[in-house]
Image (tube, helix red, strand yellow):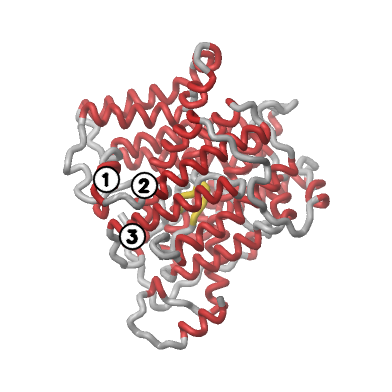
Amino acid sequence: MSRVAARLSDSGQKNTHPVDEVLPLPKLALYGFQHVLAFYAGAVIVPIIVGNALKLSPEQLVYLINADLFTCGIASIIQAWGIGRIGARLPLIQGVTFTAVSPMIAIGLGAGGGTAALLVIYGAVITAGIATFAFAWLPARAFRTVMRLFPPVVTGTVITVLGIVLIPVGLNDAAGGVGSPDFGDPKHFAYAGGTMLFILVLMKIGRPFLSSISILLGLVGGTAVAFLLGDAKFDDVGDSGWIGVTTPFHFGVPKFEWFPILLMLVVMLITMVETTGDTHAVGEIVEKDIDSETVARALRADGAATALGGILNSFPYVAFAENVGLVRMTKVKSRFVVVAAGVFMIVLGLLPKAAAIVAAVPHGVLGGAATVMFAMVALAGIQTLGKVDLKEEKNALIVGVSLAFALLPATVPVFFTQHMDADLSSLLNSGVTLGATAAIVLNLIFNGLAQDDVPAVPGVELPPRAAEPDQGAEPGRAPVPAAAAPVPAQAATAAPASTPAAAPAPVEHADGAGTPAT
């Protein structure tokens, strides 16, 4: 990497676009680590939530976190560096999508939980990744046709549904985790409430970069308090090795079942919209034209990373909007900064002790952070619906009826568990699936595929997965995870185990000038 940086930096080419500029190695490392901090919480939250829901052992959860970080690094390098016609060659960080959390839990619980459930999930993830990769090679006409299925009334509804469905997941963790002996103990809610309050204070009074890592700081602060009070146990950290390599199919050979595959294909359709929106957003920030081929290359990277995730014991991948906001804030446009961040993530993915520290976060602390993130996901959807004319009865019906369908699995679970075929239940027993399907179908019925909805892919108006800090934003406004997120971190998913207090403050690149994305 240093040789490439030196060779390209010394070339003196004045016509190099800032996106393709290779910064000196110290700056690459500094800015790359900054991206990891902003991304970490959203990266690790998905494997933690899914692993806890499937009742994985601490050792298996540590492996899942390591696999996620390792694959995140590879996926980000593919997207930013580019391989042939794969990868947008833009400063886009790849992370596990929050959109897949609820469907994966539904698939896993339908398969009985444990590692057996992971095999069914991975079979669906691999197939959906290959399908996404293949779709991105289709002619532009076919691509535009699919995108017309997702006008703002659909995407806004789906993102709102996603947040609403995920909030109970965060609240269950805030109560101590479903199935724990002391589920509902006020102690857990105290940790959750304290973590949420700390995060909200940081978002209110913090500088933009501090706000962007508020979830991560909340997890660290809440866990530190729990440790001092004897409620955070780090025994597994000592038992974990210093180095651990993620191997393909660690938990066994994936199982390919039709209904989970269909469910994951719906997830990937939604993530295609997310990545398309993020690609256009970062293109505006770095002042680079985004055409349909660039979007297609970004989606190919998504598909390849998702298929690779299933092979390397991870989950579906999408561009992380949290880091799009960081690009805007720091005005550092070089895609090689993301390559450096990818290298950091790969290294973190080889350190089981770091993952063990993350896995030791108490349920109450995790639930408090996750609830904030999931609520902000719902808010992102509501903001998108603000672009829709809801005074028109047909649009109001699309939103309202879709929300009603999304609440059905949580409101009447017995319908899916006792009165429906097990395979069909694994597909339909998900608020995200029912809500998204209802929104798409109702939009086709009421609005059809109007040509003006999506004149062309480059002009698609899509909701961001996160509200990114910009010059017009309120000082305390924090990024809205989508997702990753979700979590939390969309809480946000994997980040270094080191204390973020030592994180470098954002440094603006001398030549950078960001243009706020719409």
Q: Are marks 1 and 2 in contact (CB under 8 Å)?
A: yes
The residue sitting at 77% across, 40% down in the picture is 231
Q: Amino acid at mark 1?
A: Ala
User: Vertical placement of 405 versus 7: above or below?
Assistant: above
Residue under label 2: 135
Density class for disc 2 (Cα within 10 Å; few <14, some 14-19, many ≥20) is some
Badge 3: residue crowd in 10 Å (few <14, some 14–19, many ≥20): many
The percent position of residue 364, horizontal first and vertical second, equals: 66, 37
368 displayed left or right of 479: right
> How many discs appear?
3
For this rendering, which residue is in front, 36 or 382? 36
241 relative to 503, above or below = above
Q: Looking at the image, which residue is at 62% across and 37% down?
A: 118
The residue that mark 1 highlights is 142
Asked which secondary structure carries label 2, the reply is helix
Q: Amino acid at mark 2?
A: Phe
Image side of residue 418 versus residue 289, left or right: right
Residue kind at label 3, given as amino acid type: Thr
Occupied quadrant, residue 71 = bottom right
First in sequence, mark 3 or 2: give its number. 2
- Along the polypeptide, which appears first: circle 1 or circle 2? 2
Q: CA distance from mark 3 to mark 2?
A: 14 Å
Q: Is residue 147 visible?
A: yes
Q: Nearer the viewer, residue 320 or 187?
A: 320
Quarter of the figure with the N terminus: bottom right
